[in-house]
Amino acid sequence: MEVLVTRQINKYFYEPEKFQVLKEINLTVNRGEFLSLVGKSGCGKSTLMYVLSTMDTDYEGQLEIAGQKLTGKKQDELSAFRNEHIGFVFQFHYLLPEFTVLQNVMMPALKQSKYAREDIRDKAMHRLKTLGVEEHAHKPSNKLSGGQQQRVAIARALINDPDIIMCDEPTGNLDTYNTHLVFDIFRQLTSESNQTIITVTHDDEFASKTDRIVQMSDGRVVV
Amino acid sequence: MAGNRFQLTFEIAKVHLLSKPKQTIIAMLGVTFGIAMFIALVGLMTGLNDFTEDITMTSAPDIHIYKDITKPRQSILQQIYPNDMVWVYHQKPKNELTKVRNAKKIIELIRKNELVRGVAPALSSQVFCNYGPVQLNGYILGVDIMEEDKLFGIKSKMKEGRIEELLANREGIIMGKGLAQKLDTKKGDRVVITTPEGYTMTLKIVGIFQMGIGVIDNVRCYANIGTVQTILQQDPSYITDINIKLTDRHLAKKIAAELEAKFDTKAEDWETANATFLTGVIIRNIITYAVSVTLLIVAGFGIYNILNMTIYNKMKDIAILKAMGFAGGDVKSIFMIQSLIIGVIGAMAGLLIGYGLSVLISKTPFNGGDIISLDHFPVNFDLKFYMIGVVFGVITTAVAGYMPSRKASKIDPIEILRGQ
Ligand SMILES: Nc1ncnc2c1ncn2[C@@H]1O[C@H](COP(=O)(O)OP(=O)(O)O)[C@@H](O)[C@H]1O
Ligand SMILES: [Mg+2]
């Protein structure tokens, strides 16, 4: 069953001059799939991820996630949708530096405000534990190492049990040990809780172990 | 669970403020300073206004009836040729008496009006006061001292002697403290009074009063009506002024107009008589508010700047918050809450400091000198101004915070994330 569908997505940049960065992207991703997006630097991977993540609405074509047509929705509706259905992991960990690790992880759930604060806290602690960083829960997030921060960012992306977790080069800054760790976590998520992962990567070995590799070249999906 | 969501924006705002304590405190101090100055200034200004208004009003009649000899009169030519175009330029004033006709009758009639608290007849004249070699200008007021006391509370203003001594003493006089000091006289001394017409009489000082206003205390003397009629060489019906106090002084304008029409004399209400004084009050108020508003606007710019800076430094955080599902409105409220916290705490501190300053000012010794008898600054502690201060402060910070907050809400997260 598909969780994400795109139809004929085109996108242009107008600065410094008009050029088409995404060309006729037709992509279908199934629930529980672990998909990697690869391609040369500058081929449009990040741009596509921003479109898929609903943050970039300036495109032509159709985007549908978890059965909802998202093209044309208002910003506030998209924010609420992201909060509920999409988790993000960036290459640079992007934790909020003034908050503790635990506060960072709890934040999307507090924003959603579907559950009581105590339950959210328990869930966040549980996530931190499965990711092996629970002993840092009360430290300021910027006091952690890169690998630890990336795991905290993953815990944060998972807190609302999103349908899709989108990652843009999540292991780009990590050593082999941490890269393996992240891969194992993703694997587990797709196989055990049937969540979907779409991740951009430059790491061929990493990509080769995923369920499906989508190759991009010059704004097009080639395989 | 909406409370939960507000709690979250509030917490984020709090963390932002606490993570830059120096900046936060500086922003608050701007508001604090503005409000404190407002409270101190407005307290002092209105305190002074109220004080002077109070003593001016207690020593002045609500309505003053007299004959207006400067009133333009018809020339003889105009009387003879009433239907022709006749202009007489620069008519000389007629030599006429400033007597209020039928004063006794008028007083009786006015007294019947239940809005009137008291009516007192008086006649007055410019005089020279001589004591030894010293000669000074004075103003003698012939009064029924008991009636006068009912209107202006002379009893409580007496520094030496009692007003009853004037009744007992036909040749007595009660002198203003400033005049007595300048003449270097005291109770029991005899002073020579000379009228502009050259009539001279020696009167004995039976008491000394102080109203607290230089313009009165430095010139005025009270004597019996008969005494003044004698020195002016006028008959016993001669009255130049009728002073009226009302139960409510704000009715003065209306009642004065009625009296003027009814008795065909000039009846002047206190507002008209004290127009310059009241203009002064308005100008002082304008200055107070102008200075305070300026200070608050400066504080507002401070908040605007600091919030702009915070938002600039927090672009990345804002992008992440938006990526994880915060709507533009949530981001806006995070920063609005910050500016409101700065405003509310800053304003509260401003009230406290303003109150402290007011207390200090009210304890500062101040010599009003000749003009006004004052030993400390009068300060107004009216709660109204404290409330205006808070409302002002919070509105200023809300306005100053709005633009940066709106800008923050409009930040496009991908612009920021792409830039990294
Ligand atoms: N904001 C932008 N304005 C104009 N061109 C851009 C902008 N962002 C990216 N590009 C261009 O779009 C192309 C795709 O960029 P990107 O999606 O970041 O590639 P990738 O992530 O695959 O390396 C590149 O040629 C890049 O220079
Ligand atoms: Mg990229």
Image (tube, coloured by chain):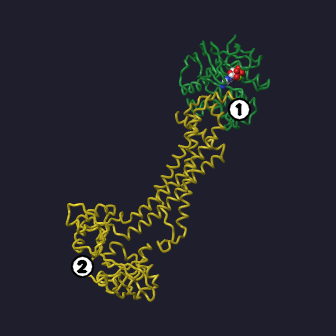
Chain colours: A green, B yellow
Q: Position of residue B366 (x, y in %)?
A: 53, 70
Chain of the residue on which disc 1 is drawn: A
Residue at image x 58%, y 46%? Answer: B301
Locate residue B412 relative to residue B187 in the image: left or right: right
Q: Amino acid at mark 1?
A: Glu
**Badge 2 vs badge 1, beta-carbon distance below 8 Å:** no
Image quadrant in which you'd find residue A146? top right
Residue at image x 60%, y 34%? Answer: A118
Give the number of the disc on residue B237: 2
Give the number of the disc on residue A16: none
Residue at image x 37%, y 77%? Answer: B155
Task: Please determine whether, in this image, residue A114 is positioned above or below residue B231.
Answer: above
Judged from the image, the secondary structure of the residue bearing numbered disc 1 is helix
Q: Position of residue B294 (x, y in %)?
A: 54, 52
In this view of the protein, which residue sits in the foreground, B182 or B350?
A: B182
Q: Position of residue B328 (x, y in %)?
A: 56, 32
In this view of the protein, which residue sits in the foreground, B265 or B60?
A: B265
Residue at image x 76%, y 22%? Answer: A180
Give the number of the disc on residue A134: 1
Locate residue B287 relative to residue B275 in the image: left or right: right
Looking at the rendering, in which quadrant would you find the C terminus of chain B?
top right
In this view of the protein, which residue sits in the foreground, B156 or B231?
A: B231
Q: Amino acid at mark 2?
A: Ser
Judged from the image, the secondary structure of the residue bearing numbered disc 2 is loop
Q: Ligand 1 lies in which image quarter?
A: top right
Instruction: Say whether residue B321 is visible.
Output: yes
Chain of the residue on which disc 2 is drawn: B
Task: Please determine whether, in this image, residue B23 is positioned above or below residue A72.
Answer: below
Separation of residues labelled 2 and 1 (CA atoms): 105 Å
Which residue extends farthest top?
Answer: A223
